[in-house]
Image (cartoon, helix red, strand yellow):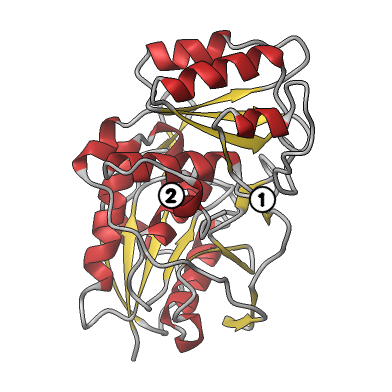
């Protein structure tokens, strides 16, 4: 019988209404497992933390990575499930995938409706995620998100709707699998680069910010980010990754000062294509910004933060396998 470890971190799946009428993460792993059907894989569980994912910082992400790595390294464990809030599940899933050395699956799931809702979706999602983590067909696929009958690769998957029962979407793609009659069925497998090292303690305080280009925008926020201690800044460019004259001038200054500058796009799907001049993407990349391909902005932010926390200076060669 497969052995699955469930690590609880909080989120809507663990939330109930408090005395002020607000939903707060308050239920532990044992309570979550009490809501699923008996039978199936052997399951052990423990609480890593009990927070809404909107409260997580780099330290909490590091602790989740360490907890998952420890479970996957256990010879008696066949797969890991992490219950997590949907707000930032895309970031935790991607970071876990970046550092996952094991061939065993790590699966994130959660809920859109709280545990005390008349019709909670958490128990069903958790049951399905345990089935995915226990399946031999899930091996070598890295970290995945299992939600509302769909299975998504970590890279490129984002929360695309605030309240829909099935809120996740993979940019420039779709689910890699689906769950039917409680069993996962995979249609494809993600291409994963070699795993990176786990986040070190320095990751806790690494600051990488995102600044969006819009009509009338300038470099004020980018400069403020650096003044606040940012080691890296990602420009969320318009279109295929364009800046403007003010952004271009700042990029030239920042790169000379040793700041890592990434160039992404605020468009939900499609890659950065440094094509335009006059302050556009071609000029920004020529000034030293690193193009981030089709990697979603908030996942790209974690990639740069992880590299910087290991003392690496991100460059096109280091990024190539990930973007």
Residue denoted by label 1: 167
Q: Residue at x 21, y 65 (%)?
A: 70
From the viewer's perspective, tell me whether residue 236 is left or right of residue 250. right
Say the numbered circle drawn on residue 313: none
Residue 99, position as x, y percentages in the image: 35, 60
Residue 85 visible, this orientation? no
Q: CA distance from mark 1 to mark 2?
A: 16 Å
Q: In the image, is residue 256 above or below residue 312? A: above
Q: Kindly identify the residue that appears in the image at 75 percent across and 29 percent down.
A: 238
In the picture shown, does residue 229 fall above or below 198?
A: above
Q: x, y (%) of residue 64?
A: 30, 52
Quadrant assignment, res 147: bottom right
Residue identified by numbered label 2: 92
Q: Element type at marker 2?
A: helix
Q: Secondary structure at mark 1?
A: loop
Label 1 Cα crowd, 10 Å radius (few <14 / some 14-19 / many 20+): some
| Nearer-N-terminus badge (1/2) | 2
Q: Is residue 283 above or below residue 41?
A: above
């Amino acid at each position: 019988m497969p052995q699955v470890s469930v690590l609880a971190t909080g989120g809507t799946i663990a939330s109930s209404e408090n005395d002020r009428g607000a939903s707060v993460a308050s239920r532990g792993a044992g309570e979550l497992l009490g809501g699923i059907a008996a039978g199936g894989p052997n399951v052990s569980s423990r609480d890593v933390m009990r927070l809404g994912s909107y409260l997580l910082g780099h330290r909490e992400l590091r602790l989740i990575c360490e907890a998952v790595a420890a479970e996957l390294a256990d010879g008696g464990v066949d797969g890991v499930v992490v219950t997590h809030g949907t707000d930032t599940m895309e970031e935790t899933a991607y970071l876990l995938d970046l550092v996952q050395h094991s061939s065993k699956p790590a699966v994130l799931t959660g809920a859109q409706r709280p545990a005390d809702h008349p019709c909670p979706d958490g128990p069903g999602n958790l049951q399905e995620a345990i089935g995915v983590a226990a399946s031999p067909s899930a091996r070598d696929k890295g970290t995945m998100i299992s939600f509302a009958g769909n299975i998504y690769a970590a890279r490129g998957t984002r929360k695309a709707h605030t309240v829909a029962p099935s809120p996740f979407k993979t940019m420039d793609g779709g689910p890699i699998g689906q769950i039917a009659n409680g069993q996962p069925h995979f249609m494809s497998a993600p291409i994963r680069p070699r795993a990176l090292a786990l986040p070190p303690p320095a990751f806790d305080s690494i600051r990488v910010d995102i600044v969006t280009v819009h009509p009338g925008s300038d470099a004020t926020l980018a400069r403020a980010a650096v003044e606040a201690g940012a080691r890296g800044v990602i420009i969320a460019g318009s279109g295929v990754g364009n800046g403007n004259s003010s952004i271009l001038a700042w990029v030239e200054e920042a790169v000379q000062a040793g700041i890592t500058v990434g160039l992404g796009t605020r468009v939900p799907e499609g890659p950065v294509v440094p094509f335009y001049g006059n302050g556009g993407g071609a000029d920004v990349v020529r000034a030293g910004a690193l193009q981030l391909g089709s990697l979603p902005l908030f996942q790209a932010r974690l990639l740069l933060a992880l590299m910087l926390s290991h003392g690496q200076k991100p460059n096109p060669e280091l990024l190539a396998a990930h973007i």
